[in-house]
Image (spheres, grey):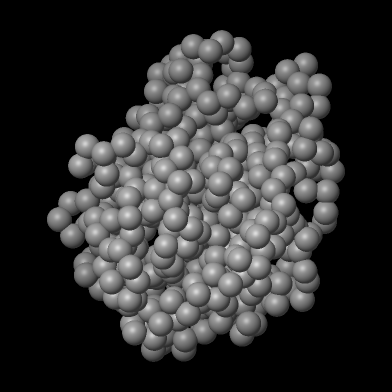
Amino acid sequence: MKTKVIAIDLGASSGRLVECALEDGRMQVKEIYRFPNAGIRVNSRIYTDILYIYDNILKGLQACAREGGQYESAGIDAWGVDFGFLDSEGELTANPYQYRDLQSADMPAIFAGQFGEKGLFYETGVQNMWYNTVYQLMGIRRRKKDASQNAATFLMTADILGYFLTGKCSLEYTGVSTTQMYDMKNKRWSQKILSKLGMDAALFPPVLETGSVKGEFLEEVQKQAGMMEGRVKLVATAQHDSASAAYAVPAKEGEYLFINSGTWSVLGTVLDEPIVNDAVFEHGFSNEGAAFGRIKLVKSIMGMWLVQEIRKCWRKKGMPADYDFLMEAAAQAEAFAGYMDVDDESFIAPADMEEAMEKYMAQTGQSEIRGQGGYYRVIMESLAFKYRQAIMELEDICQKKFEKIYLLGGAVQDRGFCQYIANATGKETVAGPVEATAAGNGMIQFLALGRVRKSDAAAIIRESFAVEKYRPQETEFWKKNYENYLQVTKRAFLNGL
């Protein structure tokens, strides 16, 4: 018997609806609908156009209905940290801000004055990242003291959309873990933090365990979508997209290292309990929610954001910017023509990424980058070195050596980049599945529907999706250039770039 569900996968640059089908112990995924998604800049503010996203979800559901067949459930995953409020009438109080809005940028230092530098980390287990929900809330309230005056309910991005579809309000464990207001050890909101923010615990609806049913599609939604056969359940999948991706790792090992490479690269491992100590804090790792109450000990790295933004620059100039062209151009470009810290503040939200990279090269005493392939290669080589640095830190924290890397997401389609990662880290890199986030989202739905046992999930992923293995090459050459990378990025840090 074939079971079909819909994974609604929302990223910071695009959204899509993916059909996930399970039959005879194998899973198939098929993208049905895709739409672009990006923050909307209005003067100095950046917003998420939540109604645009919802409208495209409805269009995607209509496309799914046209495909035929009956879908038993749907699940939404999205990026973390972003949120909105409903008023007492159940309407949005305002369009949500997007996490790259800089109104929260100075808030960690201000909060440190109240809690101490490591106070929020030790309270929650979550790293101090300037875009976390707690800092966004503080930044908004410092600008607009009455910003949440009419707020009755706090919801995160996936939960807002879930409310639109079902009329019911709830949160989900992996999503709330990114707020830095939720105590990851005791699985509850930190009253200490809420008190400092002046927030009432009554604002927060129930936090559901991964795999719970959030509700059923409203009758009006089903009519709009053209889904007239049976009510579609909305499952609380692992709503933080990296948690859904981490559930699709095709590993046989009980403990494994994964990198989900998208707009952000999320690098880490999955544990049963959080690790909260000075080493985790100093190395910039965070204890976030993994599916079914587990913990992802992860580091967030800027990732493919740099490529996405520099491609925008080139398209505006009428230059070729498709990935096939860039991968071919990078293969012909000079190796190690420059080094950069992909997490440097200058790359967070520049108006022109090419210009930002040029300025970084000049300020760090490096030569000008030549050609589009050169820019692309510098980004990807530097990203591979950043992975090496983070993996060494993670192994130090866990007191464990990982033999291989499981690479997930769209970046696995760049064979050159996959080889860079193997070369830079000295570890075998297992690349795939490409559709990890949608596959993990769908697998959790199958579990919720009782079609799969947890003990069989990883084996089904292994049997269903092709992976490619990359073994390290030219390790001494890469090791030498890693030392050069460390010197350049250290110099940039010391100079305050």
Percent position of residue 126, x then y: 55, 71
The residue positioned 28% from the left and 51% from the top of the image is 47
Can residue 439 be spotted in the picture? yes
Query: Could you tell whether 37 is left or right of 489 in the image?
Result: left
Q: Based on the displayed image, in which of its 4 quarters is residue 184 positioned?
A: bottom right
The residue positioned 77% from the left and 37% from the top of the image is 462
Front position in the image: 406 or 374: 374
Query: Could you tell whether 414 is left or right of 404 in the image?
Result: left
Is 27 drawn above or below residue 156 in the view shown?
Answer: above
Can residue 12 be spotted in the picture? no
Q: Residue furthest left?
A: 43
Is 476 drawn above or below residue 7 in the view shown?
Answer: below
Q: Based on the displayed image, in which of its 4 quarters is residue 355 positioned?
A: bottom left
Percent position of residue 284, x then y: 54, 74
Quadrant placement of the N terminus: top right
Front position in the image: 411 or 228: 411
